[in-house]
């Protein structure tokens, strides 16, 4: 309909012609101003806003790696859970929008990785099976597929959680805005988990938080400044390029900020330009959240300035063209919410043991310099010190000191700026996420608050995490309900290394130089557990080998060596079956021919038995088969 026809037919005619959508408004909501422009009647604007109220037991805010692990763990452990994400994809900095490698304990000083297991490993394995082409846009949907198949879990995308509504010192509900549907959502829950990084929900709830750098004297941190200040590590814009096989001309856009290489520190290396430059970063000594858009604009200019310099000065870049440039800078630091314990540099460097340990890390103390690329005379990061083994993360750093039903995981936990320089890595955040998701579900099950878990149920939380294949340093399983630990005999048909008895010693990986596995001689072997008296059994859990000394995450360079794999781990057990002995006869109760997980679960109708036999058959390439743990339960 032409504009003059609109005026002739009026608003009612336009509605009838379907020019104006009628959902959520009527023609009476509209009027014309003096210029003939259509306006919304302010008195009836509220009728346009759609509103919904949703009720859950656990609400996880933020769909990055920490939030995904928290939501999946909460739902798996029985809580009705919702995951609220402000982007159209899950994964946060690991998503196709930012494309940061999902690092964690990727490498220890002078040694190998100590890779994270549990939920995050399941996700990475899922990607290896379904995304062999290593596509980042496909990776987004691998995550979506993995998360949305979880029972008890609702995923809500494109939705910003903007305000906590309080009932005393508890969050009663969270007000959210879904951009794509113009809908205001009010989400009620018993427990809230803020994994959003910036922590808007936690902040509006009144949760205590810090920003900036602590003085070295406060926590005895040798790498902290003498005087506290507001500096926070900045966000980065990543870019990558592609060899086109022919000379590729380049003309910088108008917003480019020239890169001054002469003033740059020698560690601002441009050698591996095809994989991206991670140090195109702008920090802040004020309100880094409020400055985000201003910094984004500058980062766009700096990123193209670096590429312009590469094209003009590096002959090796002649055939290269920009293939992808990030539009959403990846964040490193903003608010850190205070819990009952503040994790600090001496805890990490001293490898402090916590009775309430639920996670771990091992990335170096990787503090990016104040100002980022605007401070070119200093190195992009100091890499203060590397770790020789992993450090522990306590549960008391993962719940709020003053908001009773609030947990958090990720870069926003209770820690100092220097501690954050290591713990912010996504693999490490994943261990926190699984811990708080499991704790949140336990709060629902036991009708308690997060602090009560620490006071009264800490052992229960740790045991559940270990059962679900999380790793807690210096904490073997002591599960009294595990019937495998009560077996009279454990033996195998063959042994190349380790011992079958180690499958019930409480450790699900080799630790340092101490062996905790059984390995067969060749394929088609078996392990048998015997009990002197009959037991009632309905569940058997088996933890096989995925080589935790080799990283699984997707990389832009598709690296494949002794520390990284770009395929399914060859050590992974592919096929096996489970038998139980009843009245002297072996009966098969479970079989798997395309196993894709380290933690293998067999559930079956309850039987009375005196023995089980695990028949391991094949791997995805390794000549021997290795197991780390066997558990048996009367579920």
Image (spheres, rainbow, N blue to C red):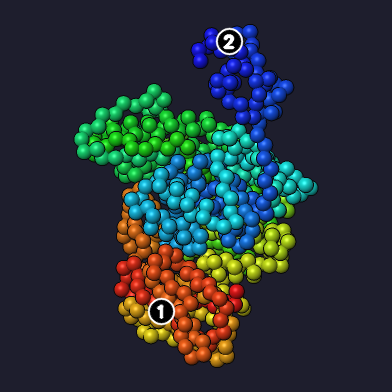
Between residue 380 and residue 391, name the one nearer to us.
Answer: 391
**Which mark is drawn over residue 577?**
none
Image spot of residue 454 (x, y percent): 68, 64
Residue at position x 67%, y 51% in the image: 56
Image-based side of 577 in relation to 457, left or right: left
Mark 2 Cα shell of 10 Å, populated few (<14), some (14-19), many (≥20): few
Residue at position x 60%, y 33% in the image: 182
Q: Is residue 153 above or below residue 584?
A: above
Q: Is residue 470 visible from the viewing direction of this image?
A: yes
Residue at position x 36%, y 84% in the image: 494
Q: Which residue is mark 1?
A: 615
Mark 1 Cα shell of 10 Å, populated few (<14), some (14-19), many (≥20): many
Q: Is residue 118 above or below residue 98?
A: below
In this view, the residue farthest toward the left is: 246
Q: Is residue 30 above or below residue 76?
A: above
Residue at position x 42%, y 64% in the image: 596
| Quarter of the figure with the C terminus | bottom right
Mark 1 element type: strand
Image spot of residue 532 (x, y percent): 55, 91
Q: Is residue 266 visible from the viewing direction of this image?
A: no
Image spot of residue 172 (x, y percent): 73, 47
Mark 2 element type: helix
Disc 1 versus disc 2: distance between alpha carbons?
79 Å
Q: Which residue is mark 2?
A: 7
Between residue 229 and residue 299, name the one nearer to us.
Answer: 299
The number of discs equals 2
């Amino acid at each position: 309909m032409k504009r003059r026809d609109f005026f002739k037919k009026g608003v009612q005619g336009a509605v009838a012609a379907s020019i104006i959508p009628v959902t959520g408004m009527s023609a009476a909501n509209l009027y014309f101003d003096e210029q003939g422009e259509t306006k919304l009647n302010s008195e009836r604007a509220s009728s346009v806003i759609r509103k919904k109220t949703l009720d859950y037991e656990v609400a996880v805010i933020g769909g990055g790696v920490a939030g995904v692990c928290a939501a999946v763990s909460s739902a798996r452990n029985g809580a009705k859970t919702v995951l609220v994400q402000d982007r159209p994809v899950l994964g946060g900095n690991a998503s196709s929008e930012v494309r940061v490698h999902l690092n964690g304990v990727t490498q220890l000083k002078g040694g190998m990785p100590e890779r994270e297991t549990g939920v995050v490993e399941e996700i990475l394995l899922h990607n290896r099976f379904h995304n062999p082409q290593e596509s980042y846009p496909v990776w987004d949907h691998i995550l979506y597929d993995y998360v949305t198949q979880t029972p008890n879990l609702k995923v809500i995308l494109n939705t910003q959680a903007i305000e906590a509504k309080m009932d005393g010192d508890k969050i009663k509900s969270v007000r959210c805005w879904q951009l794509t549907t113009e809908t205001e959502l009010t989400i009620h829950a018993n427990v809230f988990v803020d994994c959003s990084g910036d922590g808007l929900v936690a902040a509006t709830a009144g949760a205590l938080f810090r920003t900036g750098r602590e003085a070295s004297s406060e926590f005895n941190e040798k790498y902290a400044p003498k005087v506290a200040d507001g500096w926070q590590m900045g966000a980065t814009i990543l870019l990558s390029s592609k060899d086109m096989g022919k000379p590729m001309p380049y003309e910088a856009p108008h917003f480019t900020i020239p890169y001054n290489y002469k003033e740059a520190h020698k560690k601002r290396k441009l050698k591996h330009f095809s994989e991206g430059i991670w140090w195109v970063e702008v920090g802040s000594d004020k309100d880094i959240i409020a400055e985000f858009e201003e910094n984004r604009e500058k980062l766009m200019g700096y990123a193209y300035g670096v590429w312009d310099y590469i094209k003009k000065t590096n002959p090796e870049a002649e055939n290269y063209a920009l293939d992808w440039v990030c539009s959403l800078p990846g964040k490193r630091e903003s608010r850190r919410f205070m819990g009952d314990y503040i994790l600090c540099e001496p805890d990490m460097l001293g490898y402090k043991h916590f009775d309430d340990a639920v996670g771990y890390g091992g990335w170096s103390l990787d503090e990016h310099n104040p100002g980022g690329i605007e401070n070119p005379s200093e190195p992009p990061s100091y890499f203060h010190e590397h770790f020789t083994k992993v450090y522990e993360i306590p549960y008391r750093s993962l719940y709020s000191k003053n908001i009773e039903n609030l947990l958090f995981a990720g870069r926003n936990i209770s820690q100092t700026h220097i501690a954050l320089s290591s713990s912010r890595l996504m693999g490490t955040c994943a261990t926190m996420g699984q811990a708080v998701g499991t704790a949140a579900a336990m709060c629902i099950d036991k009708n308690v608050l997060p602090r009560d878990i620490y006071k009264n149920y800490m052992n229960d939380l740790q045991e559940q995490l270990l059962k679900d294949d999380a790793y807690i340093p210096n904490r073997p399983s002591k599960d009294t309900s595990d019937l495998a630990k009560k077996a009279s005999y454990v033996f195998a048909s063959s042994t190349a290394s380790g011992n079958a008895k180690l499958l019930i010693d409480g450790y699900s990986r080799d630790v340092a130089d101490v062996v905790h596995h059984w390995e067969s001689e060749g394929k088609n072997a078996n392990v048998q557990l015997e009990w002197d008296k009959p037991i009632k059994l309905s569940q058997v859990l088996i933890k096989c080998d995925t080589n935790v000394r080799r990283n699984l995450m997707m990389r832009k360079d598709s690296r494949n060596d002794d520390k990284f794999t770009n395929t399914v781990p060859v050590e992974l057990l592919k096929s096996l079956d489970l038998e139980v002995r009843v009245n002297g006869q072996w009966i098969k109760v479970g079989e798997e021919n395309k196993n894709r997980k380290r933690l293998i679960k067999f559930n079956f109708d309850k039987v009375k038995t005196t023995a089980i036999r695990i028949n391991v058959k094949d791997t995805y390439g390794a000549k021997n088969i290795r197991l780390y743990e066997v558990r048996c339960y009367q579920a």
